[in-house]
Image: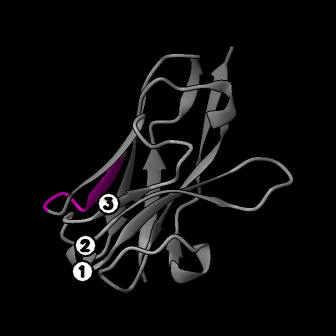
Amino acid sequence: QVQLVESGGGLVQAGDSLRLSCAASTRTFSNKAMGWFRRTPGKERDFVAAISSSAGNTYYADSVKGRFTISRDNAKNTVYLQMNNLQPDDTAVYYCAARVFQNINVAPTEYAYWGQGTQVTVSS
């Protein structure tokens, strides 16, 4: 079983930055691709970014490309999401997720483990 705990959310103004962290409790973190998703009320979880197990590959949703950066520190069992130039449309609950495979995938159904989520609110 893998437990994921997100942190770093909060209330910011448009144009500000935040860095989300996700700590994983597993000895096999370095074998797992990781992803970030977000959900707003009444909508499905949307893909935000993903990173392969070795950090050699990353992929972003078009809506965040150039503003968000996903990274990971396998020695610390942690994945990060640096979010710059935040906009009100970025307001959502952000979830960290882990695959059992090493390669990237954008579908939520391909992720076996999920964190509890952290709220990001961006005011205009």
Q: Which mark is residue 58?
A: 3
Q: Residues within 10 Å of mark 1 (few under 14, many from 20)?
A: some
The chosen color scheme is one colour
**What residue is shown with label 1?**
31
> Quadrant location of the N terminus?
bottom left
Q: Which mark is residue 53?
A: 2
Q: Mark 3 or 1 closer to N-term?
A: 1
Choose mark 3 or mark 2, whichever is in front. 3
Measured in 3D between alpha carbons, the distance from the residue under mark 3 to the one under mark 1, in whole angstroms, is 15 Å
Residue drawn at 40 percent across, 37 percent down: 66
Measured in 3D between alpha carbons, the distance from the residue under mark 3 to the one under mark 2, in whole angstroms, is 10 Å
Q: Residues within 10 Å of mark 2 (few under 14, many from 20)?
A: many
The range drawn in magenta is 75-80
Q: Mark 3 or 2 closer to N-term?
A: 2
Choose mark 3 or mark 1, whichever is in front. 3
Measured in 3D between alpha carbons, the distance from the residue under mark 2 to the one under mark 1, in whole angstroms, is 5 Å
Q: Mark 2 or 1 closer to N-term?
A: 1
Q: Say if 4 sits above or below 20 in the image.
A: below
What percent of the width, then of the height, locates residue 24?
35, 65
Q: Out of 71 and 76, give the one closest to the viewer.
A: 71
Q: What amino acid type should be assigned to the residue bearing mark 1? A: Asn
Q: Say if 61 sits above or below 20 in the image.
A: below
Q: Is residue 85 magenta?
A: no
> Quadrant location of the C terminus?
top right
Q: What amino acid type should be assigned to the residue bearing mark 3? A: Thr
Q: What amino acid type should be assigned to the residue bearing mark 2? A: Ser
What percent of the width, then of the height, locates residue 18?
43, 29
Q: Say if 101 sits above or below 104 in the image.
A: below
Find out whether the residues at labels 2 and 1 contact each other: C-beta distance under 8 Å: yes
Q: Out of 117 and 49, give the one closest to the viewer.
A: 49
Q: Residue furthest front?
A: 62
Residue drawn at 42 percent across, 28 percent down: 84
